[in-house]
Structure formats: C-alpha cells, structure tokens
Image: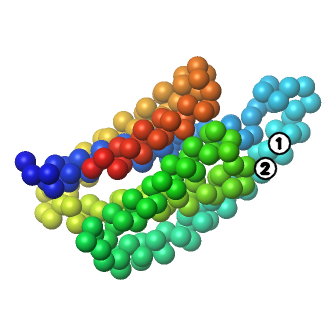
Amino acid sequence: MSSVRLRNELYPLGFLGVILVDTLFKQWVVYFYAPPEARLGPGGAAAAIGSAKGIGAFLLIGFLLQALAGPWIGQLSDRLRTPFGRRRPVILLSLPVLALSFIATWQGWAPSWIAVPGYCLAFTLVAGPYLTLLPSLAPTEKTRVRMSLTGAVLALVGLGCALVGGPGLIDRYGFGVLAWVGLAGLGLTVLP
C-alpha cells in the first residue's frame, strides 16, 4: 500500500481525536471555571453562581465566534492553493494554536475570558478544514461512505472515552491531566 493511500485510510482516525478533545472541553469547562459550592467552601454559593454566569457568557462568545468564523475559514480553505493542498496547511498551522489553548485552559495559564473563546475559535480553525478533507481524499462514493462510517464509529469511541474516562482521570490526577489527554487526541488528528 502506498504512503498516500495509507494516509488517506488513516484519515478517519482523526475523528476520534477531534471528538475526544471537544467532548472533554464541553463536559468539564463549566465545572473547572465555576466549581460547585462544595469546592468553594462555606459561603461560596454566590461566587459559584457568579462564576457560572461568567463562564456561560464566555461560552456564548466562543460559540458566536465559531458561527461567525466558520464560513470565513471555509472560504479561506476553499481558495487556498499550495503544494500541500487547500486544507492541510490551515489544519497544520491551526493545530498548535488549538493545542496551546486546550492546555492553557486546564493548566490555568489563561483566564476564562481568554481561554474559552480562544479554544472555540481554534477548534473551528482545525475541525472545519479537517472535516471537509473527505471529498478530496475519497474520490468515489463507496470510499467516502466507508471512510465516513469508520470516522463515525471512531468519533463514538472518542466520545465514550471522554465521557467514561474523564471523571476518573480528573478524580485521580486533577484537571491538568485533561491537557495531556487532549494533546494525545490531537496527535491522532495530525497522524494521518
């Protein structure tokens, strides 16, 4: 099997990484930045409510950024012409930004008003072009269907790993471990 064909066959593996990272983020970001009253100590209910409102606003801003940037990123990657293709340069240049924003979220390097919208925008920069690679990698309908189904199954595996494994990892190692699990997941996106 040629290296190009092998790379194309590994493409669905990235679905696992993308979904794992996004599920970990969406599942735990509110809990991380607005912990329950028990984690804040006595009289912490007001602080928890304030934190929850703040993180909700930052998530709203992040999701609005995703909605506004998505078409722009799609148009950019559609018009880009390089020897490496249209979408791969966008993915490869954006992936370090996504990795850094994901790590910064869980390591506490950035305040929530930067980390949350930053992650959302960086995720769109990577996921949008990645998901639109399929038609150029799979020239026939039969191949596209097979690769899509494989990607969907691997996405479910990533989702299950995040939902089932996330709580145990956090309980045992703390939130910082999510940064490294996410980094490994993003490695699966780059591998193909």
Circle 1 residue: 49
Q: Nearer the viewer, residue 150 or 182?
A: 182
- Point 48% across, 27% down: residue: 165
- 10 or 46, nearer to the observer: 10
The colour scheme used here is: rainbow
Q: Residues within 10 Å of mark 1 (few under 14, many from 20)?
A: some
Q: Position of residue 132 (x, y in %)?
A: 33, 64
Q: Give left or right: position of 97 versus 154.
A: right
Q: Amino acid at mark 1?
A: Ile
Q: Are marks 2 and 1 in contact (CB under 8 Å)?
A: yes
Label 2, label 1: how far apart the Cα atoms are: 6 Å
Q: What residue is disc 2 on?
A: 53
30 or 81: nearer the eye? 81
Q: Residue furthest toward the bottom?
A: 79
Query: Residue 51's x, y, as percent?
Result: 79, 44
Q: Could you tell me which secondary element the residue under label 1 belongs to?
A: helix
Who's the residue at 18% across and 60% down the image?
138
Is 84 positioned to the left or the right of 156 in the image? left
Q: Which mark is residue 3?
A: none
Give the vertical position of 28 relative to 168 (above or below).
below
Residue type at the position of mark 2: Lys
- Outermost residue, right side: 43
Q: x, y percentage for residue 73?
A: 46, 71
Residue drawn at 54 percent across, 38 percent down: 179
Residue shown at 48% from the left, 28% from the top = 164
